[in-house]
Amino acid sequence: MTAKDNYLRRLRRIEGQARGLQRMVEEEKYCIDILTQISAMTKALQSVALELLEDHMAHCVVAAAREGGASAEEKMQEASEAIARLVRS
């Protein structure tokens, strides 16, 4: 299984969780149960995001660093900004 396949499989599972949350709200399920599912979905998204970031750092950033110059600086800045967004979320 490729990394892309893995990401897509996981995102489809998260999509299913989102549909499940919609059903729970429509059916007026207990609020704490809904919040628990939101927490699980949030953690699943964070996990995918961290893995994507790790892959980006291992491949794109490392390759740009080997080349050096403006490309390396740009990739490092992008990675830094992505990390900041993840930390704030």
Image (tube, rainbow, N blue to C red):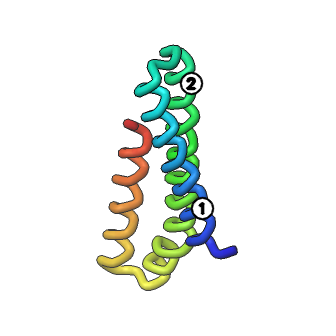
> Residue 50: percent from the left, percent from the top?
54, 52
Looking at the figure, which quarter contains the C terminus? Answer: top left
Which label number is shown at residue 41?
none
Residue drawn at 37 percent across, 69 percent down: 75
Compared to residue 59, the image places residue 17 above or below, namely: above
Vertical placement of residue 35 versus 89, above or below:
above
Q: Residue at x 60, y 70 (%)?
A: 5
Which one is nearer the viewer's eye here, 2 or 30?
A: 30
Q: Residues within 10 Å of mark 2 (few under 14, many from 20)?
A: few
Name above or below for residue 5 compared with residue 77: below
Name the amino acid type tagged 1.
Arg
Which residue is tagged 2? Answer: 36
Distance from the alpha carbon under mark 2 to that under mark 1: 22 Å
Q: Residues within 10 Å of mark 1 (few under 14, many from 20)?
A: few
Residue type of the residue flagged with mark 2: Thr
**Does residue 71 appear left or right of residue 38 in this picture?**
left
The N terminus - image quarter: bottom right
Residue at the image position 35 percent from the left and 62 percent from the top: 78
At mark 1, the secondary structure is helix
Give the camera-side residue of 45 and 30: 30
The residue that disc 1 covers is: 9
Q: Which percent across, then down, holds residue 10?
A: 59, 56
Q: Residue 2, image x and y in percent?
A: 64, 75
Task: Give the secondary structure at mark 2.
Answer: helix
Q: Earlier in the sequence, mark 2 or mark 1?
A: 1
